[in-house]
Image (cartoon, grey):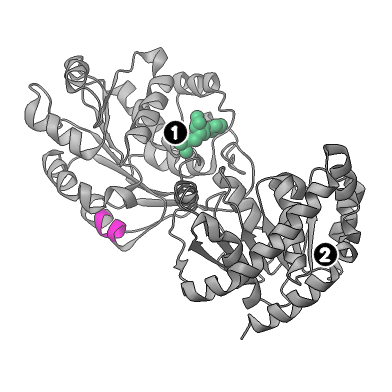
Amino acid sequence: MAVVDKAVAGGGEAQQPEPAAEASTFAELGVCRELVEACDAMGWKQPTKIQAGAIPHALQGRDVIGLGQTGSGKTGAFALPIIQALLEHRQPFFACIMSPTRELAIQIAEQFEALGSAIGLVCSVLVGGVDRMQQVLSIAKRPHIVVGTPGRLLDHLKDTKGFSLTKVKYLVLDEADKLLNLEFKESLDDILKVIPKERRTYLFSATMTKKVSKLQRACLRNPVKVEVSSKYSTVDTLKQEWYFVPADYKDCYLVHVLNELPGSMIMIFVRTCESTRLLALTLRNLGFKALSISGQMSQDKRLGALNKFKAKDFNILICTDVASRGLDIQGVDVVMNYDIPMNSKDYVHRVGRTARAGQSGYAVSFVNQYEAEWFKLIEQLLGREIPDRKVDMDEILILREHISDSKRIALTKLREDGGHKKRRKAAEDDDDEEEEAPRGHRQKSRSFKKSSRR
Ligand code: AMP
């Protein structure tokens, strides 16, 4: 095995896959006219970085290891060379693509079909959870490309007459890091045994784990390695953790962690404008220097609040994704996800507020039972697991009563503000709110804050 080439690309924040800087057209990469037209029809004006890195080598007949996430344009990076080779040598069961999930297999097949629509490409999707008879019928059409999950693919190899992979010229292992999970291992091994050794192999993975490099050694010949860093990766100087938090105790966990980080510059993200104010008031009642910015405030007021945060008059800023967008905030030590974003990309934008320009930073997420799924999606987007932390429940329970009191007082104040119009005005006057917090309570809170740090 020799890794002879490496194209490393940086990050960005665009929604589309990033185009390659140097290679400007698919034709320049060696893609044939029919497929350049197909890319055009798909609206792919320029190759992405992984496409620019992989396609020229693949067209020269090299095996390829592609390190990049879903979203980088990796399907095109392996589909275009395969279809181009198919144009020169049409045969059924020309390529076999293995994916760990049904959804991904379907997406891959859709891209093959779209790119190959003008040349009569036939594709078959063999995944679990779908009627087998339909799949047997689609195999009977002798497809050029078979995309499947290992288990169902193997079932058909065993049971479906006329289905064989012994003539396969191209094998793709997509999301190889996930394909190597135990649940797939046996099926994968069995399939590899029946696929001819004389073939081209493309292996794509989000990360190069030990298992993936072992598979690479067993499966690939003299591969070229193409690596693009994910648009949605986080920097190494950022420490990320999460707590599993019962929904009713979220405030307690938050205060517990805030107590561990005295003096840090902290941004706390919540879902709604209403929660920014409620949380800011609650924390102030507990003696924290918290300020909120929300969409209910004018841009001027928002900037005013932001300046107070920057000047460190307040060290905690509570905001929503929308309110914080477009604001240039430097020097943040900690980002807290009080509410977990439904859109995983928002997580990356949020935590990117800290650990900037090589500085260290800390991001902590409070994940309740309803948000666990979203947090999983975030980990998938990042291509890695984030470690979780546990707390002694007794420490949390000590805080509970006092926090409930503070929240009740905050809620009463918000209710007194009453009506939307009044609330808007109150949000604008947010800066003065510290003066408005009930005095006796604040004093009590301060002593509480100290004692809770024991
Ligand atoms: P993938 O990473 O293969 O799942 O692709 C992610 C999305 O990017 C898909 O919707 C593709 O259609 C799209 N895409 C792939 N290549 C390009 C390209 N060169 N230009 C624009 N979009 C692309």
| CA distance separating discs 1 and 2 | 46 Å
Classify mark 2: helix, strand or loop.
Answer: helix
Magenta residues, start to end: 211-215
The front one of 358 and 372 is 372
The residue tagged 2 is 309
Ligand 1 neighbours mark 2 (CB distance < 8 Å): no
Residue at the location (40% across, 43% down)? 57
Quarter holding the C terminus?
A: bottom right
Residue at the location (47% across, 75% down)? 392
Badge 2, how many Cα within 10 Å: few under 14, some, many 20+? many
Q: Is residue 36 placed above or below 79 in the rendered structure?
A: above
Q: Do we see residue 280 in this rendering?
A: no
Q: Splitting the image into 4 quarters, where does residue 449 fall?
A: bottom right
Asked whether, in this view, residue 181 is left or right of residue 234, the answer is left
Asked whether, in this view, residue 363 is left or right of residue 169, the answer is right
The label shown at residue 76 is 1
Ligand 1 neighbours mark 1 (CB distance < 8 Å): yes
Q: Position of residue 89 (x, y in %)?
A: 26, 23
N-terminal of the pair, mark 1 or mark 2, is 1
Residue at the location (88% across, 42% down)? 422
Q: Splitting the image into 4 quarters, where does residue 335 fall?
A: bottom right
Q: Is residue 79 placed above or below 387 in the rendered structure?
A: above
Classify mark 1: helix, strand or loop.
Answer: helix
